[in-house]
Image: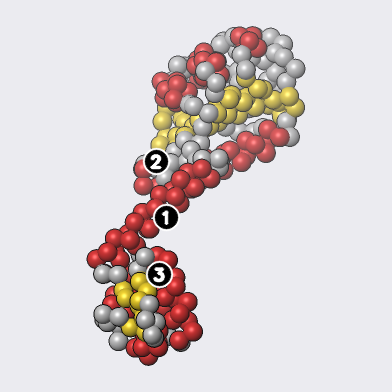
Amino acid sequence: MIPKEEIQILVDLGLTVSQATVYLSLVRFESASARTLSMVSSVARQDVYQILSALEELGLVERILAKPLKFRATHIKNALTVLQQRVSVRTSDLNKRAITLFSQSKYWDIPSKGSFESFFEVRNAYRDDPSVKEALAKARNTVRLLGSNFRWPVWFSFMDETISASQRGVKVQILMSAHQKALPPSINDVNIETRFSKNIRGANVVIFDRNKVTMWENSDAEQTAHLPVKALWSNHPGLIELFIDYFELKWNSATPSDGFITEVSESQ
């Protein structure tokens, strides 16, 4: 009787249970016929022939041309080396295929659970907020801005960084409420997409790639000029995906801008 733990090791290295059973049965003989192996392994004789052929292709079994036809097992040390190499090749190939597949997926830039600690933080948001400027500087793919109040100073205090991100190839999308049809004219000169919607309510949000999101409470310009507002920051993948889905829902139903009609000063 072949110990189950020995069979399991070979199964983990890529053999089927029947292949592992027949191979380990053959190891116990200097050579053996298919009939003998069928009896000691309890595997049907017709199946033993197919299994021996498969093991021979793997380099784990040799034929002895005699009457009756007999088979010899490769030494277990060599067999393990062969199987380990096959696992290594298979794993390497699987890894390459996985990278090719998932690098084209929207989930590629979501940090894996083991590579970061997710956080939820409430911070103060000031004019010239260094946290926002740092996140904009690190953005590599997309920056999405959604707001119902673009007239308050915090937005304009990092507009230069937003323009700079666009100039280095980051896709910038700005979605604002319909009555806010005004931004600095300098934005017209760079590749920044803007749209307007009548259905934006509540907080102002910025999504940096798929790595980080911040959401400010809505405040009027006069208050923000003197007191900080509260801002939620997070890198939690689930929360970021919710914000992205919400943004895209609003974006797809919004009206593309036809240019900026005026410049809004920080005092407004």
Picture disc at residue 34: none
* Alpha carbon separation for disc pair 1 and 3: 19 Å
The residue most toward the front is 66
Q: Dot 3: within a 10 Å radius of its alpha carbon, few (fewer than 14), some, or many (20 or more) residues?
A: some
Residue 184 x %, y %: 62, 11
Q: Dot 1: within a 10 Å radius of its alpha carbon, few (fewer than 14), some, or many (20 or more) residues?
A: few
Q: Residue at x 45, y 16 (%)?
A: 128
Query: Which element carries disc 2, helix, strand or loop?
Result: loop
Give the vertical position of 109 relative to 219 (above or below): below
Q: Nearer the viewer, mark 1 or mark 3?
A: 3
Give the vertical position of 164 relative to 17 (above or below): above
Label 1–label 3 contact, CB within 8 A: no
Q: Residue at x 60, y 33 (%)?
A: 202
Type of amino acid at the residue the image marks with label 3: Glu
Q: Residue at x 71, y 35 (%)?
A: 252
Query: Which element carries disc 3, helix, strand or loop?
Result: helix
Query: Which element carries disc 1, helix, strand or loop?
Result: helix
Type of amino acid at the residue the image marks with label 1: Arg
Residue 31 x %, y %: 30, 80
Q: Is residue 77 left or right of residue 43?
A: left
Picture disc at residue 90: 1
Residue of label 2: 119
Residue of label 3: 56
Residue 50 x %, y %: 47, 77
Where's the N terminus, which quadrant?
A: bottom left
Type of amino acid at the residue the image marks with label 2: Phe
- Number of numbered tags placed on the structure image: 3
